[in-house]
């Protein structure tokens, strides 16, 4: 699947710097040229996306929520 278009304007391309896994949710630190963006997502989503240290991702920021899309 590739992302054709998305309505979230605040997008920060970067690489996963740290993953703090929990039983239900995990904390993902993404290193971008503008600094670290942190997202809290379900651990199931971490596994489904195949996120590992160094994965290239886009942090999608809307209001106070940060979503992750793997590239």
Image (spheres, grey):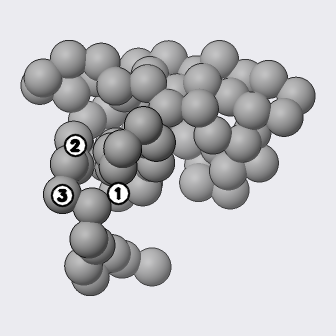
Q: SS at mark 1?
A: loop
- How crowded is the residue under tag 1: few (<14 C-alpha within 10 Å), some, or many (20+)? some
Taking depth in this image into account, of 7 and 23 the one nearest to the observer is 7
Residue on which the image places disc 1: 71
Quick check: 53 left or right of 50?
left
Looking at the rendered image, the disc whose residue lies closer to the viewer, 1 or 3, is 3
Quick one: quadrant of the C terminus? bottom left
The residue positioned 50% from the left and 17% from the top of the image is 18
The residue positioned 43% from the left and 24% from the top of the image is 38
Quick one: quadrant of the N terminus? bottom left
| Relative image position of residue 7 (x, y in whole percent) | 26, 71
Residue on which the image places disc 3: 9
Residue 54, can we see it?
Answer: no
**Is 63 located above or below residue 3 in the figure?**
above
**Is 15 located above or below residue 8 in the figure?**
above
Residue on which the image places disc 2: 13
Looking at the rendered image, the disc whose residue lies closer to the viewer, 2 or 1, is 2
| Relative image position of residue 41 (x, y in whole percent) | 63, 40
Q: Earlier in the sequence, mark 1 or mark 3?
A: 3
CA separation in Å, label 3 and label 2 = 12 Å
**Is 67 located above or below residue 35 in the figure?**
below
- How crowded is the residue under tag 2: few (<14 C-alpha within 10 Å), some, or many (20+)? some
Looking at the rendered image, the disc whose residue lies closer to the viewer, 3 or 2, is 3
Check whether the beta carbons of the residues at disc 2 and disc 1 lie within 8 A of each other: yes
Q: Earlier in the sequence, mark 2 or mark 1?
A: 2
């Amino acid at each position: 699947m590739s992302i054709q278009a998305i309505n979230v304007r605040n997008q920060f391309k970067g690489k996963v710097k740290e993953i703090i896994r929990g039983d239900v949710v995990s904390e993902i630190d993404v290193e971008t040229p503008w600094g670290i963006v942190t997202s809290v997502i379900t651990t199931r989503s971490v596994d489904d996306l195949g996120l590992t240290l160094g994965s290239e991702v886009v942090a999608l920021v809307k209001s106070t929520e940060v979503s992750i899309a793997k590239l």
